[in-house]
Amino acid sequence: MSQPETILRRQAALPDGPAAAAILLQPLLAEAAGEDAQAVSLTLDYGVAPETGAPVALEAWVDRATRTLVFAHGRLLTSAGEVAASGSAVFRRVTPQT
């Protein structure tokens, strides 16, 4: 598997609640997909459970893009580098690429 061209990275504190990973990952996945992309689906898989308020690192990148769809992947990492959550999203391009 080849490395993605661009990996977006952010630092954050884990918010409270069951949707904490989605709250952090979805906007970064959307940013990776591009301004003209609308979310179609989001799938999350959970790993270790960090404490609320713990510092986490976020990463997102585009796995594959077609003329009308973007497939993005991201992950939320603890300060120790453990995967707290990983997510995959599909976005539809509002303006198809030519």
Image (cartoon, rainbow, N blue to C red):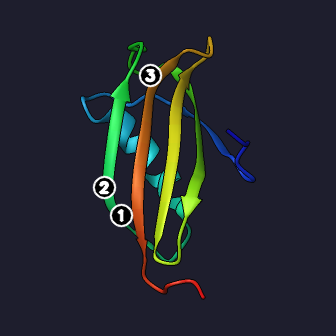
Q: Quadrant of the N terminus?
A: top right
Which residue is found at the position 51% from the left and 30% from the top?
76
Real-space Cα distance between discs 2 and 1? 6 Å
The numbered disc on residue 39 is: 1
Task: Name the secondary structure under disc 2.
Answer: strand
Mark 2: give few (<14), some (14-19) or many (20+) Cα within 10 Å: few
* Badge number at residue 70: none
Question: Distance from label 1 to label 3 (Cα)?
Answer: 27 Å
Residue at x 70% of width, y 48% of height:
4
Task: Sort mark 3 into few (<14), some (14-19) or many (20+) by Cα contacts within 10 Å.
Answer: few
Which structural element holds mark 3? loop
- Residue 1, compared with residue 29, is above or below; it is above
Which element type, helix, strand or loop, lies under badge 1? strand
Is 18 placed left or right of 80 in the picture? left
> Which residue position holds label 3?
53
Mark 3 and mark 1 in contact (Cβ < 8 Å)?
A: no
Q: Is residue 48 left or right of residue 41?
A: right
At label 3, the amino acid type is: Gly
Image: 76 above or below 65: above
Determine the CA span between mark 2 and mark 3.
Answer: 27 Å
Q: Nearer the viewer, mark 1 or mark 3?
A: 1
Q: Residue at x 28, y 36 (%)?
A: 19
Q: Are marks 2 and 1 in contact (CB under 8 Å)?
A: yes
What amino acid type should be assigned to the residue bearing mark 2? Ser
**Place of residue 21 in the rendered image (x, y in percent of width and height, measured from the top left):** 38, 34
Q: Residue furthest left?
A: 18
Name which residue type carries label 1.
Ala
Which residue does the numbered mark 2 point to in the structure image?
Answer: 41
Image x and y of residue 75, in percent? 52, 34
Which of discs 2 and 3 lies nearer the camera? The answer is 2
Q: Position of residue 80 (x, y in %)?
A: 62, 11
